[in-house]
Image (cartoon, helix red, strand yellow):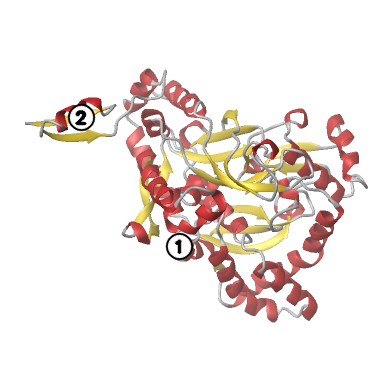
Amino acid sequence: MSVVTTGVDLLADAIAAQAVDVTRVDWRPPMPGTESDLATVALDPRRSAANTLAVTAMLGVTAHLVDVAPASEVLGLQRGEFLHAGPPIEWARASGPMRGGLMAGAALEGLVDDPEDAVALFEDGKSVSLEPCHHRGTVGPMAGVVTPSMWMFVLEDRATGRRTHCSLNEGLGKVLRYGAYSPDVLKRLRWMGDVLGPALRAAVRGTVDTSGPVDVTGILTQMLQMGDEAHNRNRAGTLMLLRDLSPALALAGLDPQDVAQVLRFVGGNDHFFLNLAMPACKLALDAARDIPGSTMVVAMARNGTDFGIQVSGTGDEWFTGPAQVADGLYLGDYGPDDANPDIGDSAITETAGIGGFAMATAPAIVRLVGGSVPDALATTRRMHEITLAENPRWSVPVLEFQGTPTGIDVTRVCRTGILPQINTGMAGKVAGVGQVGAGLVTPPAEIFPQALARLAELAP
């Protein structure tokens, strides 16, 4: 006799105690209330082919770094226009770090002299506007605030000409993206606008003209083999970028002091490459958008108040729920009471199959975000249960070079109850504080049944 059991182990243990062969199946009921919608979507004749098309389109993209330029130039941002991370939100509902980032941005643009004076500006709302980064082909880490004068990385899929963008990484601690707006934050941002941005533009354009544009997707492939997961650990990626750009930077005819400052800043900022990994992931996922019948998630993003997802088969619609506070490690004397709920567009990395989905490639990440090495390995294995495919470019050496889990499937999340795992930084909930820690977080469970219900409505 051979017995297959599911659910709790009481029956399996009793049978095994009688020397009967037992196969235990890790099964759980679907999320409450999703049974009918799961059946409807399962019967959608478009679903299988649509998901295959979405995954194929995503995996076919290669991101290249083709330019660095101000947001006013590449995004058309005008004075008083601000981009932010996550789904749409208004000032009245904005979290502390989101407000702090916007206040810093207003001072950077000269709309106010003192960041504190920007509160009245945003409360009035007549001369400013807020829009998600995702709506402009852009992603921003943490608060994700983008203003017209900020310099942006420009990534391109050379086969199609599609582009995505991201601001330059400021480093860690008290920085705009974590909601800080002190004088030293603004001083650093102005240096980035006056020196770093123009220097990187010269280096990137020089590289394009000589050896060809930097293959960001290729760097991602290599860095995953070198202990990075491309969300909270980007050390190898940053150094490879510096290697590729340094020759052109040295030959750009810039002031040697400026070149030294740029090399020192980038080389000393292990997170610098994150702002290239994010738009590379968005570029790939945007290729999978707007495929009728597809249940694949193409964006996960947080604004510090709401967590939202977008799905290929439902267009630009956001499905949102309350953002969660991460569970992790804190800096100094900070603790859970100091942390803001999850914030940032950087979960685009997990959406593409790296970051928290690739924790097995970077076991050292647990020293920053918490957990253990076995947890990291188990997380990557678990994410395969809610994804449509593996990415052959991005493999995990310790798992026999298995491809990273790719293409989050709304139906599989609802059917298993397994939520996507995200590695994240933690911003202080009070505007101006900055970073307070780093940890692990998942989306609010209710947003996936929301998306499933909409997919069911759209099924023929």
From the image, tell me which residue sits under label 2: 12
Spatial separation of the CA atoms under disc 1 and disc 2? 42 Å
The image shows residue 265 at horizontal and vertical percentages of 71, 68
Residue beneath the point at 74% across and 55% down: 73
164 lies left or right of 312: right
Q: Is residue 150 left or right of residue 51?
A: right
Q: Nearer the viewer, residue 90 or 98?
A: 98
Identify residue type, mark 2: Ala
Please tell me which residue lies in front, 357 or 428. 428
Furthest toward the right, the residue is 113
Q: Which mark is residue 221?
A: 1
Quadrant the N terminus occupies:
top left
Q: Secondary structure at mark 1?
A: helix
Viewer-proximal residue among 298 and 425:
425
Q: Earlier in the sequence, mark 1 or mark 2?
A: 2
In the rendered view, tell whether residue 202 sits above or below residue 458: below
